[in-house]
Amino acid sequence: MNSLDIDFQKTALVIIDLQKGIAKLPNGQEIVEKAARLVKLFREKAGFISFVRVDFHDGQDRLNPKTDQPVNAVQRPTDWAEFVPELGVGDEDYIVTKRQWGAFFGTDLDLQLRRRGIDTIVLCGIATNIGVESTAREAFQLGYDQVFITDAMMTNSQEEHEATCKYIFPRIGKVRSVQQFLSEVNGLA
């Protein structure tokens, strides 16, 4: 395992879809608590934090390809896209609203990271193999170094989560748990 050399002036924490309508899934609270530990560290180190949510204006902006597993459009509560309060999203944080799985396509996330000289992202959130993996693949293609905090992620099944963590993430970045990441950046590893 390669060690981490994190420069918080050049590293962003990117948190995917920890919003009220998604984080209420089973085990979602555990993911929120782990992500909150990362938020606390990045605030202490004056690092850049981007909270990403998926939301739609009127539903016409939603991707709607013909697939074998179509997504049912359901009526969502009005607070569905609000970030969970435990993360303490503030005015200093950068908010990205995406209309598809990945956080880069169709947003200004790449532009905002580059303007700040950021070359590394620390990634976590829901769902491991959908929003997080799509964002990770986009970041890889854009040339970012990445650290994946896999115990601060979840998806529909353990099998799907483990497949992404085992076969995709190690090929495009570094894989860590919250505790490993905290220990390494604080010089305890």
Image (spheres, rainbow, N blue to C red):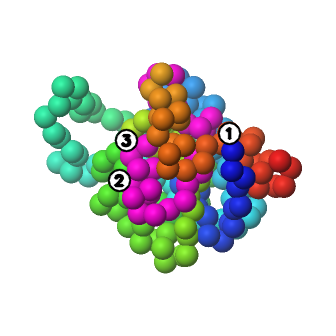
**Sequence-first disc among 3 and 2:** 3
| Mark whose residue sits in front, 3 or 2 | 2
| Residue occupied by mark 1 | 177
The amino acid type found where label 3 is placed reads Thr
Q: Secondary structure at mark 2?
A: strand
In the figure, is residue 118 to the left or right of 101? right
Can residue 93 be seen at all in this image of the molecule?
Answer: no
**Occupied quadrant, residue 75:** top left
Compared with 147, 50 (above or below) is below
Residue shown at 21% from the left, 51% from the top: 61
Range of residues picked out in magenta: 133-158
In the figure, is residue 43 to the left or right of 113? right
| Residue occupied by mark 2 | 98
The amino acid type found where label 1 is placed reads Ser
- In which quadrant is the N terminus drawn? top right
Residue 91 in the image: state x and y as whole percent.
Answer: 56, 65
| Residue occupied by mark 3 | 78
Neighbour tally class for label 1: few under 14, some 14-19, many 20 plus, Cα within 10 Å? some
The amino acid type found where label 2 is placed reads Lys
**Occupied quadrant, residue 42:** bottom right
